Image (cartoon, rainbow, N blue to C red):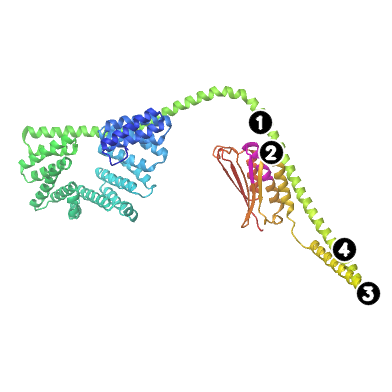
Amino acid sequence: MSKNEGFSNIERIKYAEKAVYLSIKLDVDSTLLNSNKNLSYLYIVNQKFEKLKDINFANINIANKLKDTSSIANANYNLGYAYESIQKIDSAYYYYYNAAKYYDKLKDYKLQAAVLLNMANLQEAERDYIGAQNNVIKAIELVKKLPINAFNLDTQWSLYNTIGIITGELHQYENSIDYHKKAIKSINTTQARLQLSNDAIYYYKTYSNVNIASTYRKKGDYNLAIKNCEQIINDSKLLNEDPVTYAYILNELAYSKFLRGESSDSEIEFLFRQSYSICDSVSDKELKQTVSVNLAEYFASRKVLDSANYYATIGYKLGKELSHNKTILKALVLKSKIETGEASKQYLYEHIKLNDSLILAERANRNKFMRIDFETDEIKQENKQMSRERLWLLITSISLLVVLFFLYILKTQREKNKELQLERQQQEANEEIYNLMLSQQNKIDEAKSLEKNRISKDIHDGILGKLFGVRLSLDGLNISKTDEATKKRGYYISELKNIEEEIRKVSHELNSEFIHQAGFLDIITALVETQMTAYNINYRLDIQDDINWESLNNKIKIHLYRILQETMQNTYKHANATLVNISFKYEKNLLTLTVSDNGSGFDLNKSRKGIGLKNLDSRIEEINGKLKIESKINKGTIITINVIVSSH
């Protein structure tokens, strides 16, 4: 309900606070953290900064308990925003700095870049231009790694805009203009136009062009400054959509014309007054103070001292109210020139005093931000050192126990090595036995073939020849014309023909060249049946009928036999399975052996390879095969071996 935008903000906050209350009663940290984060967002939307601080301090504590780095980073980000909003710059920078470090650890470059931008803006406002510049450059490198979307484009434009302002303050005007042009270029691509609305692109370009015009004016290139200002003012949309920016560019145009020494004073005064009037109508004190001191400077140059003093005083008061030191300094210089006698000296003295304090403050601010960076890292290093000390204490404590078990472990390991060595020897013996089995099977097949050929020849050359002779003799006896002799002879001749045909059929079958495939299949079937019966495990054996085992060389057969044997042993030893499925499939020169069970499974990421799995790897490598293991806790294991064979 708190996320339902159909409710008012006050109602949404009440629902979110109710969710937090229920989460506290439920006493589940993760649920409470999620409820707090939701309420925190609503506090940001409604600018409730004190409550925002309280809830995010709580979030840091909960997130630390849960070791939720992402939520710790988020809470620090929110605290930085809260302190920035209430103008506590030191605290804001501190929490932004922490957030940036956590986002760096998480490799969340999107939010890390956004936080670095906020840090740079704080530093720019406090005149720590070098520190701000460093943070912006780091953030720009991060944004380059990110996909193109509206959020990242906004961050990228803001970064180029900020570094453009910073380099302008450092009087690096060419660099400043270049960065502002890069800001325009970043949102002027085809991909950017697909991600951003037309209005967003319009405002980004307008603000960058305004900054470029302002930089040309600061550089002293008044012709280009005026040209850029006039191009912006010619856009009628700007006055209606953003009157403050329109007033700002009117002021820039007037001030540039004034500094260039325009002869038409009336036009300059008209532009200044038009800008001032808009500031008044929209109550924008920030711009009004700037226009006021510019008007004062303009009237002072024309010796209209009353008007100059009037606008200088307005600029001075607004500068004081807004703590805008640049405006105050400029107003003091103007008033020291406009006023005479003691009053002039007083304004000049105040200007010198304020300027000196600002120089000291600027230096202190630079040191302050560096100190925050250093002290935050120093605290982290101290925490790491304490963790190391605790770790060494723990290691020292348990090392005594380790010594007590060392001899036992050594003895056990030796026995295990002997056992593994015996097992290895047995495996080698099994291979020799299997080789003998295959060799014997080949000899048996060869003997069978020879015997069949011998019998076929004997039948064809001996029996069939004799029977053929008898039949011819009987045909000759048919000369006798008695009915009885004729009947008997016909009967015997018919019988002899039947015998001859039957013998011919047997001879043909015995002599046919077929491939006997039962040898390897018999061995595999016997292996599976013997081991599964011994292990008391149910099994299913599925072997594709049309696999030509004779085309495989003995090396592949041996290793397949041993791989299957090793896999079934591992299933028995470790899986606690009640059913094992074994299959041989062949397709497109790829022979696939699959062994799956319904056993306990294991975590592939945590499991260390034992001798069994290492042997499997070694055998599969020998036949240029590939091994794939899929396993989940309590959901069984599937082992798949693929071997490329040359023919089928």
Mark 1 or 3, nearer chain start:
1
What's the distance in space between the residues labelled 1 and 3, CA to CA? 93 Å
Q: Which residues are magenta?
A: 562-581
Q: Nearer the viewer, mark 4 or mark 1?
A: 4
Task: Please name the residue that numbered disc 4 is placed on.
Answer: 458
- In the rendered view, does 541 fall on the left or right side of 15? right
Give the Cα separation between the discs numbered 4 and 1: 66 Å
Q: Secondary structure at mark 3?
A: helix
Viewer-nearest of labels 2 and 1?
2
Q: Amino acid at mark 3?
A: Leu
Q: Nearer the viewer, mark 4 or mark 3?
A: 3
Labels 2 and 1: the sequence-earlier one = 1
Residue corresponding to mark 2: 535
Label 3 crowding class (10 Å Cα cut-off): few <14, some 14-19, many 20+?
few
Q: CA distance from mark 2 to mark 4?
A: 50 Å
In the picture of the structure, the residue carrying the numbered disc 1 is 413
The label on residue 477 is 3
The answer to whether residue 301 is left or right of residue 108 is left
- CB of mark 2 within 8 Å of CB of mark 4? no
First in sequence: mark 3 vs mark 2: 3
